[in-house]
Image: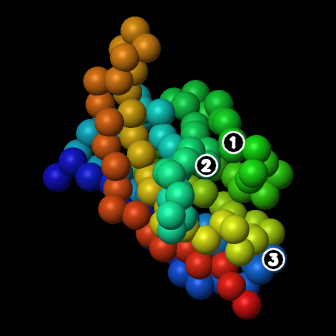
Amino acid sequence: QVQLVESGGGLVQPGGSLRLSCAASGFIFSLNIMGWYRQAPGKQRELVASITSESNTNYADSVKGRFTISRDNAKNTVYLQMDSLKPEDTAVYYCNAVTFITKRPLFDLWGQGTQVTVSS
């Protein structure tokens, strides 16, 4: 199937760490820009981090210096290492894959999401 499956979420104490994984299947992973988004209760979904096929990265200001996105094309997997977690990081985290042709998205796929809860 063409899908993205997130894993690694859970409950963590403030200041702790989690590593999210997103396993891709059914499409050419290496050609896609991969991203992690999150949506907190009552909030809009926001981009957390993205990584291109050449491993260039971008981060939301709120997570710079704390989160790291990476990809392993051989394993068709993208990761989000989250350190120094704060309660405001609590959200459902979604993996996304997109391919652009002349700046137009021709492929846009979302995972089902994984819950991250940061609480004492």
Residue 58 falls left or right of residue 65: left
Q: Earlier in the sequence, mark 1 or mark 3?
A: 3
Please give the residue where the numbered disc 1 appears in the rendered image. Answer: 59
- Tag 1: amino acid: Tyr
User: Which residue is situated farthest in the front direction here?
Assistant: 42
* C-beta proximity under 8 Å, tags 3 and 2: no
Instruction: Tell me the element at label 3.
Output: loop
User: Which residue is situated farthest in the left direction here?
Assistant: 1
Corner quadrant of residue 17: bottom right
Q: Is residue 32 above or below residue 88?
A: above
Across and down, in percent, residue 23 comes to 39, 57
- Tag 2: amino acid: Val
Give me the residue at 75% from left, 71% from top: 86
Give me the residue at 60% from left, 57% from top: 80
Residue 78, can we see it? no
Per the rendering, the mark at residue 100 is none
Please give the residue where the numbered disc 2 appears in the rendered image. Answer: 48
In the image shown, does 11 or 28 lie closer to the viewer?
11
Please give the residue where the numbered disc 3 appears in the rendered image. Answer: 15
Residue 61, can we see it? yes
Circle 1 Cα neighbour tier, 10 Å, few/some/many (<14 / 14–19 / ≥20): some
Distance of label 1 from label 3 (alpha carbons): 19 Å
The quadrant of the rendering that contains the C terminus is bottom right
Circle 3 Cα neighbour tier, 10 Å, few/some/many (<14 / 14–19 / ≥20): some
Distance of label 3 from label 2 (alpha carbons): 18 Å
Give me the residue at 40% from left, 64% from top: 113
Across and down, in percent, residue 72 comes to 52, 47
* C-beta proximity under 8 Å, tags 2 and 1: yes
Across and down, in percent, residue 71 comes to 55, 46
Q: Earlier in the sequence, mark 3 or mark 2?
A: 3
* C-beta proximity under 8 Å, tags 1 and 3: no
